[in-house]
Image (cartoon, rainbow, N blue to C red):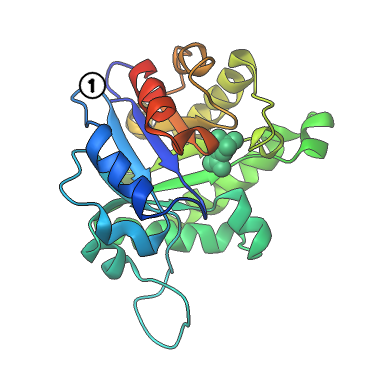
Amino acid sequence: KELRKPLVAGNWKMNGNRSLVQDFCKSLAGSEQVDIVVCPPCGYLSYFDQASFALGAQDVSHLNNGAHTGDHSVEMIKELGCRYVIVGHSERREDHQESSELVAEKALAVLTGGLTPIVCVGEPLDIREDNKEQEFIGKQLTALFDKIPAELLSQCVIAYEPIWAIGTGKTASPEQAQEVHKFIRDELAKVGSSVAEKVRILYGGSVKPSNASELFNQPDVDGGLIGGASLTTEDFTAICQSA
Ligand code: PEP
């Protein structure tokens, strides 16, 4: 774990406004100990002036350019100052029918463009109730591993986000999170032990200042992907300080 710098990323989803951007630029400080990333809606990215934290996009196209109305390419996201891109968030998988294969294409495009993908995986409630979460997540990971060469895979960040814990106020227990994170790391180890050592695995799903430390203290939890609690500088700063 010492080899991996903690990372906390805030996913604003379709929330926020220019005044919140100003708030964050003024009040959220970058850190030596933790990589801090804010992922606002794309249209706001260029308003982040002299931020001391990193920026990320919430999604990107796997294609370079062309007739794809509404999409952004990796190069465009890069020009807007992003170093990270979330791919495969469960809301995109559901709202836009994104398959694990498409998510892997997106991750590859992000890596090829020199940015870091935060690849989201995680099971819905019915799968968890059937105790099939490892099988479910295993398939999401296989699609990724099939497309990304090992030397690029080690630069990925993976976020485990149980869908039943996203925006529900229902957090996975630290033990439940650790169990899946360990499973993900073991799967990465099958690709290569150095890959498993390097890849940061974030937990996401109703992380708040009050539960962040016990989650982040787990041996295979390297930080968090934060939704609701990333919308105020107070909560988000407190969570970053827990990492
Ligand atoms: C998310 O959507 O990435 C997320 C973790 O949301 P929340 O923290 O609101 O559950």
Q: Nearer the viewer, residue 93 or 36?
A: 36
Ligand 1 shows up in the quarter that is top right
Residue furthest to the bottom in view is 67
x 48%, y 49%: residue = 145
Residue 188 drawn above or below residue 87: above
Residue furthest to the left in view is 50
**Residue identifier under label 1:** 33
For the C terminus, the image quarter is top left
Left or right relative to 222: residue 34:
left
Q: Please state the horizontal and vertical placement of residue 9, each as a whole percent of the image.
A: 39, 37
Residue 200 drawn above or below residue 109: above
How many dots with numbers?
Answer: 1
Asked whether mark 1 and ligand 1 are closer than 8 Å, the reply comes as no
x 40%, y 74%: residue = 63
- Would residue 162 be seen by someone viewing this image from the given angle? yes
How packed mark 1 is, by other alpha carbons closer than 10 Å (few <14, some 14-19, many 20 or more), is few
For the N terminus, the image quarter is top left
x 60%, y 26%: residue = 180
Q: Please state the horizontal and vertical placement of residue 166, each as a whole percent of the image.
A: 64, 37
Q: What element carries label 1?
A: loop
- Would residue 113 be seen by someone viewing this image from the given angle? no
Q: Nearer the viewer, residue 198 or 53?
A: 53
Residue 61 drawn above or below residue 103: below
Q: Quadrant of residue 100?
A: bottom right
Q: Please state the horizontal and vertical placement of residue 73, each as a whole percent of the image.
A: 35, 71
x 27%, y 21%: residue = 3
Q: In which quarter of the image is residue 93?
A: bottom right
Three-letter code, disc 1? Gln
Left or right relative to 13: residue 194:
left
